[in-house]
Image: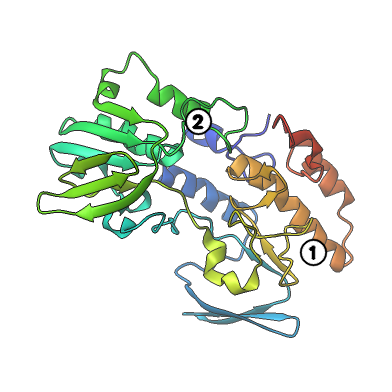
Amino acid sequence: MLDYNAIAINTSPAISTGKQHLSGLEYAEYLNQMVQSFKLNVNENCKVLTLKKFKNIFIIQTNLGDFQCRDLIWATGEYKFPSIKPFKEAELCIPFSKIKSYTDFKEDNYIVIGAYESGIDVAYNLSKNNEVEGILLIDKTDTIKVNEQDPSISISPYSRQRILDNSNTNLDKIVIYDDVEINEVVKTQDGYSVFSKEDIFTTTQPPILCTGYLGGEYQIKDFFEFAQNGKPILNDFDESIKTKNLFLVGPHVQHQNVIFCFIYKFRQRFGIIANHIAQYYGLDNEKTIEKYRKNVMYLDDLSCCEHNCIC
């Protein structure tokens, strides 16, 4: 059975580390092993400055010089691009991705806005800090109560287990408000006031913002068309409908009602892009594609995911 964090067939970060949930450093080591094993040409500390397209060629200007290519795969993720303006004065809050350590939080009460994966992760880790007195977790909907098979719609079983573990007395610090939409945060003399339509919540510390991510495709938004839900519009090969030969990989890939927001899901689209490019160059990829299909890493038929995501 394929490791759900693996990016290549016959590899397993869980087996190599002996852990199901890896730290960032451990997963980076796995990726380094992939680079060495497959002899990938990787340029580190290379910052992309601008992207241009002249006729059929992409010109990528970086701090290490210019690169050119016919096919460009944009795979910059979402973690570095939080949605920092979901309501008025949201910039007063601390984005989830800016938190470096939960041991740095002082003795006080904290407000966490957003109760999907990020919000639950923050609340759970804050509860383990003995200095923290209480955590107010504000949920725009009722995410924790929703129990769908697809973790793109509801929280994952792992997060649900963490937040509903009755044996964990630290969780008593967490108070959850369901169906509360925040409209504004105001800086006051004593700290911060967080306003919803019906309530006002106060805290001496900046609220923690866990309201989602824009996605790395917004770095080059002029090359994409976007749907009403903010997701880029792609064709059947995850290619921008606005810019030919520009492909998107990552958590913001979406087709109809199928959302590929976790690595074990969006890796199922890797082979589709690679095969589309290979066909242009006349490469025979049939045996490789069959191998990817057998390992559930080539998902081109989305009908099995429309209701129950058993793919």
Task: Read off the residue under disc 2.
Answer: 20
In the picture shown, does residue 114 fall above or below 93? Answer: above
Of residues 155 and 262, the one drawn nearer to the viewer in this rendering: 155
Q: Secondary structure at mark 2?
A: loop
Foreground residue, 81 or 32? Answer: 81
Quadrant of residue 10 within the rendered picture? top right
Image vertical order of residue 99 relative to residue 165, above or below? below
Q: Residues within 10 Å of mark 1 (few under 14, many from 20)?
A: some
Q: Position of residue 26 (x, y in %)?
A: 44, 43
Residue at 47 percent across and 73 percent down: it is 47
Question: Toward the viewer: 162 or 284?
Answer: 162
In the image, 29: left or right of 273?
Answer: left
In this view, 148 is above or below 242: above
Instruction: Identify the colour scheme used.
Output: rainbow
The residue drawn where x is 38% and y is 18% is 165
Given the image, on which type of amino acid does mark 1 rest? Ile
Q: Position of residue 117 (x, y in %)?
A: 45, 38
Viewed as shown, does residue 188 lie left or right of 225?
A: left
Near mark 2 (Cα within 10 A), the count class, few <14, some 14-19 or many ≥20, is few
Q: Secondary structure at mark 1?
A: helix
Q: Position of residue 216 (x, y in %)?
A: 53, 62
Q: Quadrant of residue 238?
A: bottom right
Answer with mark 2 or mark 1, whichever residue precedes in sequence. Answer: 2
Residue in view at x 54 percent, y 50 percent: 31
| Cβ atoms under marks 2 and 1 closer than 8 Å | no
Gap in Å between the C-alphas at discs 2 and 1? Answer: 33 Å
Q: Give the position of the N terminus as an image quadrant.
A: top right
| Disc on res. 143 | none
The amino acid marked with disc number 2 is Gln
Which residue has dot 1 on it?
277
On screen, residue 174 versus residue 156, left or right, reads left
The residue sitting at the front extreme is 198
